[in-house]
């Protein structure tokens, strides 16, 4: 099996992350060590907390919520606002 060095990452979990551990090496070079990465849409961090994932989701949703807030301030009728929300809902879920 050939390992693609550009796509392969290493993350140390738990109490081992506090200790100096040598980098993982393969014949083509050193594997990059990361503190967090995205796996199947979920941001996994080395301390296994949800903070990185929640921050990523909030950053992507904030502009859309601002847009809806601006529509509400313009006096858009509630039915139309709900229509905008239902159209944007699929975008929120794919974040």
Image: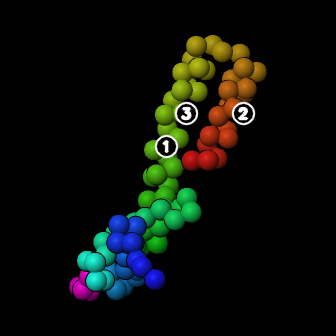
Q: Residue furthest right?
A: 79
What residue sits 67% from the left and 26% below the top? 84
Q: Earlier in the sequence, mark 3 or mark 1?
A: 1
Point out which mark residue 21 bears.
Answer: none
Tell me the CA gap for discs 3 and 1.
10 Å
Point out which mark residue 60 bears.
Answer: 1
Q: Which residues are magenta?
A: 20-25
Mark 3 or mark 2, whichever is nearer to me: 2
Residue 88: x percent and y percent? 65, 34
Picture quarter containing residue 51?
Answer: bottom left
Specify whether 30 is left or right of 4.
left
Residue 54: x percent and y percent? 50, 55
Q: Main secondary structure of the magenta part?
A: loop
Q: Using a 10 Å C-alpha cutoff, classify the residue at mark 2 as few (fewer than 14 neighbours), some (14 to 19) or many (20 or more).
A: few
Tell me the CA gap for discs 1 and 2.
17 Å
What residue sits 30% from the left and 83% below the top? 26
Picture quarter containing residue 17?
Answer: bottom left
Residue at the spot of label 3: 65
Specify whether 93 is left or right of 63.
right
Residue 35: x percent and y percent? 35, 69
Q: Using a 10 Å C-alpha cutoff, classify the residue at mark 3 as few (fewer than 14 neighbours), some (14 to 19) or many (20 or more).
A: some
Q: Is residue 8 above or below residue 75?
A: below
Q: Residue furthest top?
A: 75
Residue at the spot of label 2: 86
Mark 3 or mark 1, whichever is nearer to me: 1
What residue sits 61% from the left and 42% below the top? 92
Q: Using a 10 Å C-alpha cutoff, classify the residue at mark 1 as few (fewer than 14 neighbours), some (14 to 19) or many (20 or more).
A: few
């Amino acid at each position: 099996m050939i390992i693609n060095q550009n796509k392969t990452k290493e993350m140390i979990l738990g109490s081992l992350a506090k200790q100096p551990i040598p980098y993982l090496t393969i014949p083509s070079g050193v594997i990059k060590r990361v503190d967090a990465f995205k796996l199947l849409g979920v941001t996994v961090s080395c301390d296994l907390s949800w903070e990185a994932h929640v921050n990523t989701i909030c950053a992507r949703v904030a502009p859309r919520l601002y847009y809806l807030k601006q529509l509400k301030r313009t006096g858009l009728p509630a039915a139309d606002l709900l229509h905008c929300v239902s159209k944007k809902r699929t975008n929120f879920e794919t974040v």
